Image (cartoon, helix red, strand yellow):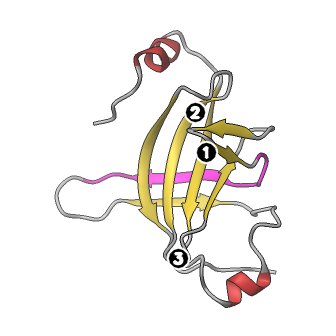
Amino acid sequence: MLNIPTDMQTRLDTGATTMCWCWRVTRADDQVFGFTEHDRDLIVDGMNFQAATGFVPGDMEHTSGFATDQASLFGTLNTDTITEADLARVIWDGARLDVLRVDWADPSLFVQVWTGEFGDIRRDV
């Protein structure tokens, strides 16, 4: 069960439309990167989340029991953060992924909704 901060729950209860998605990615070499679907960079939990990178949330499937949850991200990551050299070194494969729901009007209000890891990264040209 999610522990949603009281102020954030109050905004959600009013139908607030100031929510966005943020993704914190920790690569195999322990470097951490932040991305958001919002149109401007956000500072969340003391970290910069880079805006308009092209990520959009895909389907999340939650199961009970011992089955593994599944989630996906779709889109083009339009950033200089991921380089051809890094892809060749496969340091993004297996990266830890934390998905946050953030109130962009007050980024101190956020909740981590999911944690997982990347599988094999695929690149299409």
For the point 74% across and 49% down, the residue is 50
Q: What residue type is labelled 2?
A: Val
Neighbour tally class for label 3: few under 14, some 14-19, many 20 plus, Cα within 10 Å: some
How far from the left and from the top, in percent, is residue 88? 69, 90
Of tags 3 and 2, which is closer to the observer?
Answer: 3
In magenta segment, residue 53: yes
- Is disc 2 placed on a helix, strand or loop? strand
- At label 2, counting other C-alpha atoms closer than 10 Å, the crowd grade (few under 14, some 14-19, many 20 or more) is many
Asked whether the beta carbons under mark 1 and mark 3 sit within 8 Å of each other, the answer is no
Q: Is mark 3 on a helix, strand or loop?
A: loop
Return the disc, 3 or 2, that comes first in the chain's sequence.
3
- Check residue 89 for magenta coloring: no
Q: Mark 3 points at which residue?
A: 28
Residue type at mark 1: give it: Cys
Task: Provide the residue designation for mark 1.
Answer: 22
Looking at the rendering, in which quadrant would you find the C terminus?
A: bottom right
Looking at the image, tell me whether mark 1 or mark 2 is earlier in sequence order. 1
Instruction: Identify the magenta region.
Output: 51-63
Contact check, label 1 and label 2, Cβ < 8 Å: yes
Instruction: Name the residue beneath numbered marker 2.
Output: 102
The image shows residue 53 at horizontal and vertical percentages of 77, 54
On the rendered image, what quadrant is the N terminus found in? top left
